Amino acid sequence: MNLPPPSVLGILFHGKLYPLLERAGSLVQAADLYSVALLTQLYQGQRLAVLRQVADEQWQFYLTVAGVFIAASRLNHQGLRDARKEILMDIVAARLNDWKPDGVRGFEDCKRVFEAEHDRLTAVGSEPQFVASDALGIWIVGNILGHAPETSDECQLVRDAGALVTHAFFNWFNWIAE
């Protein structure tokens, strides 16, 4: 990771250096840990056989990337200067790469599908409070199933997985104030 020296970071972050950097640095680990807990919760709440047919590591990958994506995408709405956002996202990307070599690729795929599904769901008049979480859930479940959700149980899993991950990481950076 190519970060400026600490003195430059201190200037860029005006005394908020450590909390911002720590929050960015711990995002992937927190999302990974949450994915394990969430997987247990999904097992308990769903009757879908697909939950047990897919390796836990695969679920964990998609749930973790989805959590990182939601937190990172919300970072863009926090009013931070571009230089700060870039440094924080460099940290997140480095942690994703350290966690799994294909973590950044997964993040980029999540972003692409999320944006397309968000636009599609908005255009068809989906319930506004569920558009973001459903778009995220479509990416998670679609990757797990290998196809778009078809049954009512699969669609419920989209809503459940997307809403739980979104709720957990939507406010990850909200405590940051300029």
Image (tube, rainbow, N blue to C red):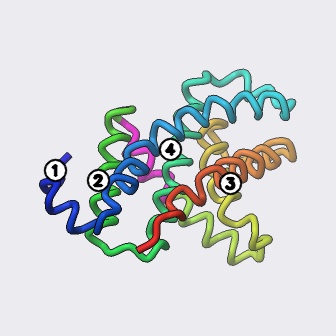
- The local crowd at label 2, few if under 14, some if 14 to 19, many if 20 or more residues have their Cα within 10 Å, is some
Q: Element type at marker 4?
A: helix
Q: Residue at x 50, y 53 (%)?
A: 69
Q: Is the magenta stretch mostly helix, strand or loop?
A: helix
Q: Which mark is residue 90?
A: 2
The disc label shown at residue 167, or none: 3
Asked if 60 appears above or below 95 in the picture, the reply is: above
Residue span colored magenta: 102-112
Q: Which residue is drawn at 77% across and 47% down?
A: 160
In this rendering, the answer to whether 64 lies above or below 118 is above
Quadrant of the image containing the C terminus: bottom left
Sequence-wise, the earlier of marks 4 and 3 is: 4
Q: Which of marks 1 and 2 is nearer the N terminus?
A: 1
C-alpha span from label 1 to label 3? 31 Å
What is the distance, in whole Å, between disc 4 and disc 2 at their CAs? Answer: 15 Å
Pointer 1 or 3: first along the chain? 1
Mark 4 to mark 3 CA distance (whole Å)? 14 Å
Locate residue 156 relative to residue 165 in the image: left or right: right
Depth check: 119 or 15 in front?
15
Which amino acid lies under the numbered mark 3 shown in the image of this protein? His
Is residue 2 magenta-colored?
Answer: no
Q: Are marks 1 and 2 in contact (CB under 8 Å)?
A: yes
Q: Which of marks 4 and 2 is nearer the N terminus?
A: 4
Question: Which amino acid type is shown beneath numbered disc 2?
Answer: Asp
Residue picked out by circle 4:
65
x, y (%) of residue 9? 21, 60
What's the mark number on residue 2?
A: 1
